[in-house]
Image (tube, helix red, strand yellow):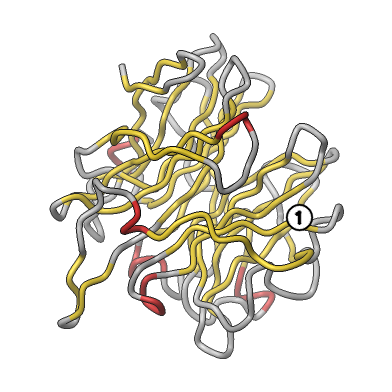
Amino acid sequence: MKCSEINIRDPYVIYLDGIYYMYGTRAANFGNHTGGFDVYTSTDLETWSDPIPCFDSAAYGMNIGVNWAPEVHIYRGAYYMFATFSRECGLHGTFVLKADSPLGPFAPHGDRELTPVEWECLDGTLYVSPEGKPYLVFCHEHMQILNGTICYVELSDDLKRPVGEPVLLFHASDCSWVSKYPMNGEDHYVTDGPFMYRSETGALFMIWSSFIDGAYVELSVKFADGKLGTDFTHLPPLYTKDGGHGMIFSTADDKRFLTFHSPNASGHEHPFFVEIEDKGDQLTVK
């Protein structure tokens, strides 16, 4: 399969032993009641396998509503998938799944969501500090609070539960480039898809998505002193051509690529790859 034949949102890629593994949201019905997630494999980022089911959400009673944004992290020798699911209460939350192989099958890890139970949350991503401490970085969704936020919370070492209270990083409207997104007669400000990236010189960045004049975009922040915390700078937009919910990965020849879905239109989304330049203290699209 070519990328133009793959209809997914929120692509996420890891590279292991000569093989690229790509996960994503099954885009049918905007990721609602889609029964779980697939993984695609490739050796060149151009030709991909047919979808390989790697998590069956119905088997675990998790096909209640949304099945969104799976991303797989290698942590302490196992594969952990962080993904967003609807809960019985109607709100969304980020859950963690575990497998012994990047192909799955994944199964729930822990007995609860990692995000606050009373919040509408999505797009949780794992960040592990240089000291080895794990954190979940996630969005408190605009659908509940109008002006979406990005927050983080420390996790237990086994990734099964949050430790302490979430820390607010920023509201979407705090970024001067972000435009309002009108919905149902109200002005919303969107936060989507955070992903943490450490540069070759140790600088710490976070990319995330929102809207600028109706276009889905990739934005970024740079943290002071290379540490996750509330001291950071909003940087100029990284990509503004109707593509978003991205992540950064390294290739076999040590290049860096940003992948995201585009266009942001249900039924037409495909994974895109653009090379980025890691200048140490700055990220730019080539």
Q: Name the one closer to the observer, 42 or 283.
A: 283
Q: Is residue 40 visible?
A: no
Q: Residues within 10 Å of mark 1 (few under 14, many from 20)?
A: many
| Most distant residue in the top direction | 253
Residue 177, placed above or below residue 233? below
Task: Tell me what residue is drawn at x 80 percent, y 68 percent.
Answer: 110
Q: Is residue 243 above or below residue 91?
A: above
Residue shown at 19%/38% (left/top)? Answer: 241
Name, please, the residue furthest toward the front.
Answer: 231
Residue 202 lies left or right of residue 11; in this view the side is right
Residue drawn where x is 33% and y is 34% of the image: 272
Whether residue 45 sits left or right of residue 240 in the image: it is right
- Residue 269, given in percent of the width and then of the height, sits at 28, 50
* Residue 93, visible in the rendered structure: yes
Labels in figure, total: 1
Quarter that holds the C terminus: top left
Q: Label 1 belongs to which residue? A: 98
**Residue 218, image x and y in percent?**
33, 41
Q: Quadrant of residue 2?
A: top left
Q: Amino acid at mark 1?
A: Lys
Query: Position of 197 compared to 166: left or right?
Result: left
Using the image as rendered, state which of residue 136 and residue 86 is in the foreground.
136
* Residue found farthest to the bottom: 89
> Which image quadrant for residue 47?
top left
| Residue 21 coordinates in the image, percent (x, y) | 57, 35
Element on which disc 1 rests = strand
| Residue 89 to residue 212: above or below | below
Residue 80: where, in percent of width, then height?
Answer: 72, 50
Q: Quadrant of the N terminus?
A: top left
What's the residue at 55%, 54% (across, down)? 70
